[in-house]
Structures are given as C-alpha cells and as structure tokens.
Amino acid sequence: MTKIVKKVVKFGGSSLADASQFKKVRDIILADPSRRFVVPSAPGKRFKDDTKVTDLLLQAQAASAQGGDWESVFSDVEDRYRGIISDLALDVSLEGEFAEIRSRLVTGCTKDYAASRGEYLNGILLAAYLGYEFVDAASVVFFDGDGVFDSVKTNRVMGHVLESCENAVIPGFFGSGADGEIVIFSRGGSDITGAIVARAVGADVYENWTDVSGFLMADPRIVENPKPINIITYRELRELSYMGASVLHEDAIFPVKAAGIPIHIKNTNDPSAYGTRIVASTEQYQNEYIITGLAGKKSFSLINIEKDMMNSELGFGMKVLKVLNDMGISFEHLPSGIDTMSVIVSDSAIKGREREILSRISALVSPDNIDIEKGIALIAVVGRGMIRTQGTACRVFESLAREGVNVRMIDQGSSELNIIIGVEEKDFETAIRTIYSEFVQR
Ligand code: ASP
C-alpha cells in the first residue's frame, strides 16, 4: 500500500500580495493533492515602496490610540482586500469583518488584535478561492497567561480539529491568550504557525513558500551568483542563521525539528527551482562541496587579556566572565592561549561601557595587559562535510593568507561543524569571497 503523503504549505506575504500572486499560489496548491493544509501570511509588498498590510494595521491602531486619523489608513487595508476579491471575481464579502475591525479600532483594540487581522482576512479569502475550509487560528493556537506559546494545548486541540478536515486554511501569525484575546508571535511569525500545523497533523514535509529559491551558499551582495544550498541540516542552518543568513523565522525550526519533519523552502515565483530542504540528518544525501555555506557579520570587539602564568591561575576565566555576566553582557566566543585570553562580544553590547569593563576586569584579575580591539568581523564557515575531513582548516587559512587577509581569531567548535574566523572589518568581503572560491568550483 502506498503511503498517503500529507504536506503543510505556508505562503509568505509577497506570495499573496495581490490577485496575480493568489493565482500562482492556487496553481501550486492544486498541482499536488497532498498540499492539504495551507498557512497564509497577510498581503505583503507588491512593489519596493509599498506597505505591508500588517504595517498598515499597526499604523491604524497607533493612530486610533493617539486620537489620530486611523480611518484613512484602514480604508487602504480594505481596498487591498477588495481589489483581490474583485480581480479574482470571488464570491465572498469581507464587509462584515471590516465593520467588526472598525468597531474594535474605535473602542481601542490591542496592537496584537490589529496586527493579526491581516492574516485572518487573507485566510478567509484564500479558503474561499481554494474551496478549502477556514479554521480560525484563534481556536487552535494558544498562548498561556504570560503570553508564552502553549505548545502542548495547541498540539492537542489543533491535531483534533484538523483530523476531521480534508483540506484547511489556517491563518498564520496569531492565536488566542488565556483570556481569549488575540496574541501574536513576533514579526514573520506565520513561519512558526506553519511549523506548528505541520507538527499537529504529522505532515511528511513542511513547505515554506517565499520569494527566493531557498538559501544560498553565501550572501549574493558579496559573492557574485552564489550557488543555492539544496540540502542543509537543522544544525548547519542554525549556525548560518545566527551569523545573519535568514530566510525563515528562527523559532519556526523547533516544532518541526522535534517531530523530525523536513522543511522545504520553495519559491512561489519559480516553483520549478529545487529550493532548499532542511533535514535532521543528511546521511542519505551526498553534498557536492565540503562546505555547506558561509555567513558573517561585522561589528564585534575583542577584549584581549594577557597575564604571565595565566594558565596556572585557577578561576581566571571564570572571573573575567563574571564581570561580563554582572554587567549583563553575553559573549560570543572565547579563544584562548597559554597566557592570553580573548573574549569576543558584539559592539552594541559594550558600547559606552568599555572603560568600566576594563577597570572591573583589571581589578579582579590584575592582568599584565588588557585592551579592547574594535572593528572585528566574524565569518562562520559551516559544513557537515568538514567533520573528519582533513585539511579543511588549512585550505581556509592558506587561501586567506594568499589574499593577504590577516586572521585575528580562530574558533572551531568540537562538533567540527563550523570554523569561526575573526578578521578586520576591512577584510570582511575579501575573506568571504576567497573562502567561497576556494571551496566552490565555478
Ligand atoms: N504578517 C506578519 C508580518 O509581517 C507575519 C508574517 O508575515 O509572517 O510580520
């Protein structure tokens, strides 16, 4: 007997920005009957300077709270939906919904309620257009009294409700709190709803449709035409996302990762492109390159500490970190030598507090030398292919030396999944391009 495949598909705001995008979305969904559960975002930007519906709704709420002109902003929202309805010749009316939202705006609704209406209204339209059932997220996604997502209750109730649905549209981004009021996830949160639905229905795959063909091996603003990443593990993705490569809301990973459901990033505007598949383990997939991707960020500082015989001074590192801890500063990396230790922190975490840091560490550990060096960029070279592959680090550093890039810091985690390199900010772009070309044949 062949297994019946179940897919959850989430479409981002740009995929549903207007009627022509709605058509693409419908074609994609109807092309595969296993695409049974659909999670839409609110209409996004149609062109560069356009405003997302979520932002318009937040503007309307803010204007109403300040006694300003919220009505003109809200009519823009209504017009966006009316335009989609008439362009698609949909036999559906949102006028009753608009009246309800207007009355809530007049009496002072919460930001969360206002922001959530973009997805809510879009969900009604998409369900009507597809002929799918509409399931209000407020009845299946729950937050506790502190506004924290309640995954146990959500999974139970949503699983039960969707079990009896052949097909359904569940709007992304929001749910209801302990008092029944609407609560939203952070911005971009429809990605999270999609992951939650995938877990609740036990999907075989969570397809996340957006406006790019998945992740690229490097930032296209730095490397010309970087290759796409076809397969990546959750752990590699976490390393790259932390360093700034982002397509997906970070919190969207956890529900599906726990359930062992792969995520497939696809492009609504180019459905035939493979996209990126995010999986738990890639044992069955062979990667073409040793490295999976490269990402990096500027604006870090090194706190360099030197002291003779540091290595034999018990508790030295702990005292240094205690100072940072007491000042509420979290550190990124901690490379150390026998008599030297450096702590890498982001510039923003220490801004204006440099002198205090220096004097507090000096008072506690009496170093021979201590200074703060600014203008450091960090680059993460990530790849499961590096695990137990000899010579990878050597290739990274040799290629950088050839290009005259001075490496200020190296940190390789014990997992061997990544090598973190610190360079001066002026060398950042050169370093990324150099490492990319070393590992990726063009
Ligand atoms: N519409 C919301 C936002 O703009 C949520 C989402 O698109 O995922 O952030």
Image: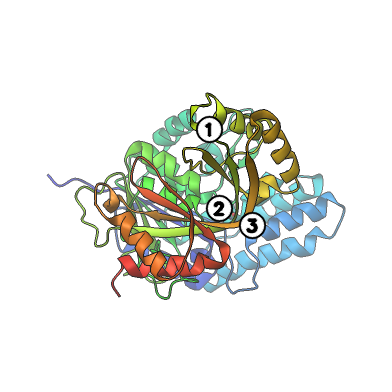
Image quarter hosting the C terminus: bottom left
Asked whether disc 2 touches disc 1, contact meaning CB atoms under 8 Å apart, the reply is no
Q: Residue furthest top?
A: 314
* Residue 179, placed above or below residue 409: above
Decide which of 228, 387 is in the foreground and name it: 387
Residue furthest out toward the left: 1
Residue 376 image-quadrant placement: bottom right
Marker disc for residue 188:
2
Bin the neighbour count of mark 2 within 10 Å (Cα to Cα): few under 14, some 14-19, many 20 and up: some
Confirm or reject: label 2 Cβ below 8 Å from ligand 1.
yes
On screen, residue 409 versus residue 165, left or right, reads right
Instruction: Provide residue 411's location: percent of width, then percent of height.
Output: 43, 47
Report helix, strand or loop for mark 2: loop
**Can residue 300 be seen in this snapshot?**
yes
How far separated are the C-alphas under marks 3 and 2? Answer: 10 Å
Name the front one of labels 1 and 3: 1
Structural distance between the alpha carbons of marks 2 and 1? 46 Å
Characterize the local packing of mark 1: few (<14), some (14-19) or many (20 or more) Cα atoms within 10 angstroms: many
Residue located at (57% from left, 51% from top): 120
Amino acid on which disc 3 is placed: Thr
At label 1, the amino acid type is: Met
The residue wearing badge 1 is 310
Question: What residue is disc 3 on?
Answer: 54
Query: Disc 3 on helix, strand or loop?
Result: helix
